[in-house]
Image: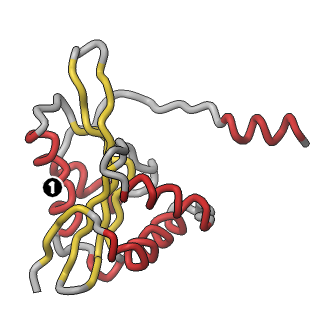
Amino acid sequence: MSTVVRPVKDGDFFAWLDLYAKYAEFYDTELTDQRALVLWSWLSDPDHEEQGFVAVDGDRIVGLANVREFARPLEGDRGLFLDDLYVLEDERSKGVGHQLIAAVRALAEERRLGVVQWITANDNADAQRVYDSVASKTAWVTYEIDLAAAQNAETA
């Protein structure tokens, strides 16, 4: 079979959820039902900024990508941020990740956006090999303030 990348659709929920749960597990993150349903509601809402794509081989969803636009003030344009990218383990090294990234790039080009960006874990060497073949690693270092953790500590 050949793999096709397309936007998510209503009937994809359970297969998508299975992949997204594996993605969360890969990054050692708890995926609650509430979080999964919130994200799915975003992906199902044509007016929400978050969009989802799936890689389908026959009737099997084998990969996913979730993206959103963002403003780039210094550049005076907008970009596309690749929030999530996951390919089933038994489908890796078959080009599925490249296909998903190509679909994301095509969307950005269609919208005339200035850049596609994403981050990955420092120790995710397999993914970085794919990313190095399609993009340039930047010099930027990522920081975050975990407000939920701070709020939980304050209430404890």
Q: Where is residue 90 in the image (x, y as percent from the top left)?
A: 31, 82
In the figure, 131 relative to 115: above or below?
below
Quadrant position of the N terminus in the picture: bottom left
On the image, numbered disc 1 is attached to which residue?
Answer: 103
Q: In this view, does 126 lie to the left or right of 155?
A: left
Q: Where is residue 32 in the image (x, y as percent from the top left)?
A: 62, 65
Q: Position of residue 44 (x, y in %)?
A: 36, 59
In the figure, 88 relative to 132: above or below?
below
Q: Where is residue 93 in the image (x, y as percent from the top left)?
A: 22, 73
Q: Which residue is drawn at 45% across and 54% down?
A: 123
- Residue type indicated by callout 1: Ala
In the figure, 61 relative to 25: above or below?
below
Q: Which residue is drawn at 52% across and 63% down?
A: 36
Near-viewer residue (16 or 40):
40
Mark 1 crowd level (few <14, some 14–19, many ≥20, 10 Å Cα): many
Q: Which quadrant of the structure image shows residue 43?
A: bottom left
Which colour style is shown?
Answer: secondary structure
Q: Which residue is drawn at 52% across and 56% down?
A: 38
In the image, farthest residue toward the right: 156
Q: Which quadrant of the structure image shows residue 58?
A: bottom left
Quadrant position of the C terminus in the picture: top right
In the figure, 83 relative to 38: above or below?
above
Element on which disc 1 rests:
helix
Q: Residue at x 62, y 63 (%)?
A: 30
Total of numbered circles in the picture?
1
